[in-house]
Image (cartoon, grey):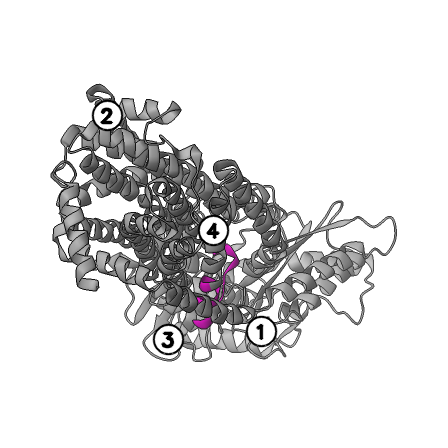
Amino acid sequence: MIGNNLIGRSFRMVEVFVFYHPRSFLAAILIATAFFATRIPYLEMYSNFADLLPQDHPYIRLHNDVKDTFGGANNVVIAISVEEGDIFTSDILGRIHRLTQGVDSLPGVNHNLVRSLTHRTVRKTWLTELGNMNSEAYYDPLYPEMSASELAKLKLDVMANPTVYGLLVSPDLKSALIRATFNEGQLDYVKIFRQLGDLKEEVEELRASETEPGVNIYATGQPVLMGWVYSYLDQIIQIFFLTLTILLLLLLAYFRTRGYGIILPLVGVVISATWGLGIVSLLGYNLDPLTLVIPFLITARAMSHGIQLVERYYLEAPHAVDNHDAARRTFETLFRPGTLGIVSDAVGLLLISLGSSPINVKLGVYASIWAGTVVITVLIAVPLVLSLLPLSKSEEVVGANEPRGAFAAIARLVSSRKGSAGVLLLALAVYVGGGILSSRVQIGESEPGSPILYPDHDYNISSKKINENFPGSEEMYVVAQTDEPGGMKRPEVLRALTDFQIHMLHDPEMGGTRGMPDLVRQVNQILHNDDPRWAVIPDESSYVGGLMFAFMASSPIPGALKEFIDTDDQTANLVFFYKDHKGETLRRAIHMAQQWIDDPENQVEGLEFRLAGGPIGVTAAINDAAFASNMVIIPAAMALIFLFVALFYWSLHAGWLMLLVMTFCTVATYAYMGIVGIGIDVNTVPVIAVGIGVGIDYSIYMMDRVREETARAEGDLNVGIRHAIATTGKAIAFTATALIGGVVMWAFVSDLRFQADAALLLVVMLILNAWAAASLVPAWIVRFRPKFIVSTSMKDTETDDLQVRQATA
């Protein structure tokens, strides 16, 4: 019994102490609010690519090791396509060169890792009459006007080079590709995006004459994606004011002439938001545009606690002696379940920090502190303000303990034996059906392109066009290492790499591959008068070394082999091109690679392979971390909330009842995700964890209210449930509506699909939790009559109250 345990007495002492010093507490809250307000101007909003990366994952360790040598995952891929003819005209080649130069001048670009038909690092290699190898760039910007014969020869030269034809020039010769890798860090995505936009407009409009065909430019890659995200930040202001309008209209509709109910929840929201934003700034964290739905939800949750408090104040006011007594009654009634609910919120948020991605660590820390401060900014502040305001009684609440309308119907249903059995059977059906549908939920993304944006968005259309014309915009790096310098020259090593490439080509979704063996075979063929029979790996290391030296000597560009091999000839990079980074694509790619590597028949002494870099490897690591986080965070949140509730009510049954609600809502949520195609990734795991913590508040309020009303009715459970639904059920319905109003505008206004999906996912979780609180919790109590509810008496509670007040006085 809560009245007879240490936790209960501690809460009561806090309640009494706070109301003995209302002005002092309010002054302290206002001073803290003013301080936090001074920190808000220093708060920054930006995305950092490194925040997405789980640094302890082996794929990310590989990524960090090779990103400056072979390239990373922060890439831009741009295609320029002609509407008619092919790209081999002076005008189109000039445009490709202008686009390449523009990309090479973008802020943060790694100049050594830019690849394009017209770039200085992409060269034609041939054997001279004297038996020497020579090379030159395919395009000379000093002589942009080319004759028909020169263009025809260029076309043949390109088609003869497998490292260019198909990879940088499409097989139909209508498109050319420009690839660039950016140095990681806090890139200026806005500047990159704007420069790319200006460059695109400039190149598309360049035309030598009206008869020249028009061109289309398509861009994809992480910097482009983040540029699009930043371009929609102005919508946040629009969403903020629309959300504020919705919440204000809801308050006006619910409280009508009861002024405290309209003003005080909004005051609580302002104080809570000021504290939260100030805390984020003090911690030195940034707000990420992709996670803004969660701060909005925390703020809306603060308002819902304020609504609960004011609603209870109007119920207590007719029975109170004065304004101080009404506020004290309100505080004493709701402080304990409210605190338990807020702790549940904060726990769900804090556990997000268990994820290995820095973005979730930051979110978990600041969001849990923000949510926890609601105890002070709302649960304590609002009743203290009420204690200083004139007593306000409302005729509307007279007789409110008698259920009417929909709430009366719900009360009759769940308090009857058949009705409660039906509710529990429905919940069981949801468990079974939800478990089946949950199997559809994928780890990672479930469709091509980026789920952050809508399928018909320019970014996703660009990704589709590029992947239709080229092997793939998504690269996976597999790094091969030997145990000594020069080991990559060994013929058996190169043959193993060739076998590995052939094995990976069995994947129908893999568009192509590039690696050191391809270059060695190509150079060997060139040195034998372009005879294709010599496109083989030589039998001697010294011969291989000679081919590599001949290739480097033919190029005046330093680091001609850099994209294939390191300077010690000890580490080589194999690149595999994929057309998407869906979860199933990633799992299949990694599985096929690991399968070949683990086969004893493929082992070569002194050679080892490391998985996996590039966009595919990094995304796979992020997905692995998200899945691992999901398997830890969600059960841990449930376990801790179970523990808190069980200790708070000193009843395992109470903890079990809340666990029942949490698992019911979680299974149903996963079923929804499976139906609509939302995958488990670094963005959705926090949303689910937040939904669990926020949603369980309703059930805690309902359970506590049933317990209180049953005690008032001297153990009559049916009366207790009917009165609880008349009061708390009505408040739950409204606060759920207010919370939905706090996030729903993201679904209708935001052009970012992820924000819309996250908002809808939260709406589903809130509806499920509201239904569970209003129906499942009372139905379970009716059927199983838990002792911590039916055996509670008001006499014990009132006696304990008196003891605490005397001790405090």
Name which of mark 3 and mark 4 comes first in the sequence: 4
Name which of mark 4 and mark 2 comes first in the sequence: 4
Name which of mark 1 and mark 3 comes first in the sequence: 1
Tell me the magenta residue range.
275-291
Horizontally, residue 223 falls left or right of residue 432, namely right
Amino acid type for the residue under numbered disc 4: Leu
Q: CA distance from mark 3 to mark 2?
A: 78 Å
Q: Is residue 696 above or below residue 423?
A: below
Q: CA distance from mark 1 to mark 3?
A: 24 Å
- Mark 3 in CB contact with mark 2 (< 8 angstroms): no
Q: Is residue 557 visible?
A: yes
Q: Residues within 10 Å of mark 2 (few under 14, many from 20)?
A: many
Quadrant that contains the C terminus:
bottom left
Picture coordinates of residue 222 (x, y %)? 54, 59
- Mark 1 in CB contact with mark 4 (< 8 angstroms): no
> Residue at coordinates 88% horizontally, 49% vertically from top-left?
210
Q: Which residue is mark 3?
A: 487
